[in-house]
Amino acid sequence: MLNSIENARLLDILGNRNRRRIIELLREKPCFVTEISERLTLSPKAVIDHLQMMEREQILAFRTDEKRRKYYFLSHDISIVVSLEKQEISDMSRGSGARTEFWRALLTLQKMVQSRDELVTMVGHLDHDIEDQAREIGKKGQNILRNEMELDLVIALSHYPLTLPDLAELMGKDETEVLQAVQGLVTRGIVEQEGPQYRISDVYAL
């Protein structure tokens, strides 16, 4: 049983919509950072920040695969029960207006849910197209990219600019190893560095 302080801290963590979305995704299956980023259309940096916060609170845990990528999963299931007590309306003269406002709010909610469902369907189709395109990049990059790490790097950077620590976290590898690979991409003009971040070069041409 959690005490009031722990309850407050947990509610503060779950008060963030994106952290709730991550938890719902991990209810389905363990996922690694790139997968969460693509499914929820969040930057890898934002995903990493959310995961690290929930890991510190022991809501999540992770395991690594043969590529040393971190697969996150729920270490504890989360169930929140909210109890609502009905209050009698003392001023019955407001009943008609209250019903009108209630139905207006209910219809608005219905439209919002319908719009959300349409967007989820569209995102599902787009996720499939993104996966196909990533496979196509793997095929077309066989004579351009030197190894699988370079492929993983360019796919990650095609989503968002990322710093070296972010890339190391995303790849599940040491920063020295990632730096060597990303510098090779920079030398060949595929990737460029802008401040602490790396991104796909705008001027690269085959």
Image (cartoon, rainbow, N blue to C red):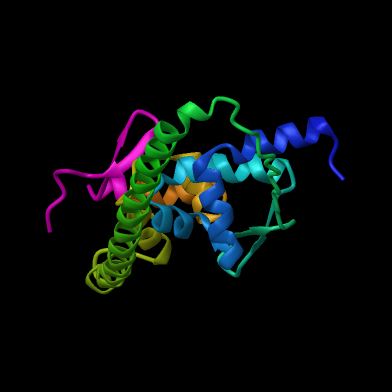
Q: Nearer the viewer, residue 2 or 44?
A: 2
Q: Position of residue 185 (x, y in %)?
A: 31, 51
Q: Determine if residue 69 is in view.
A: no
Q: Position of residue 94 (x, y in %)?
A: 46, 28
1 left or right of 162 in image: right
Q: Residue at x 47, y 33 (%)?
A: 95
Task: Look at the image and give the residue range highlighted in magenta.
Answer: 185-206
Residue 203 among those drawn in magenta: yes
Q: Position of residue 7 (x, y in %)?
A: 76, 36
Q: Is residue 27 above or below residue 194?
A: below
Q: Is residue 189 above or below residue 142?
A: above
65 left or right of 141 in image: right
Q: Position of residue 183 (x, y in %)?
A: 37, 45
User: In what quadrant of the picture does the N terminus appear?
Assistant: top right
Q: Is residue 112 above or below residue 8?
A: below
Q: Residue furthest front?
A: 93
Q: Nearer the viewer, residue 48 or 100?
A: 100
Q: Determine if residue 200 is in view.
A: yes
189 left or right of 83 in image: left
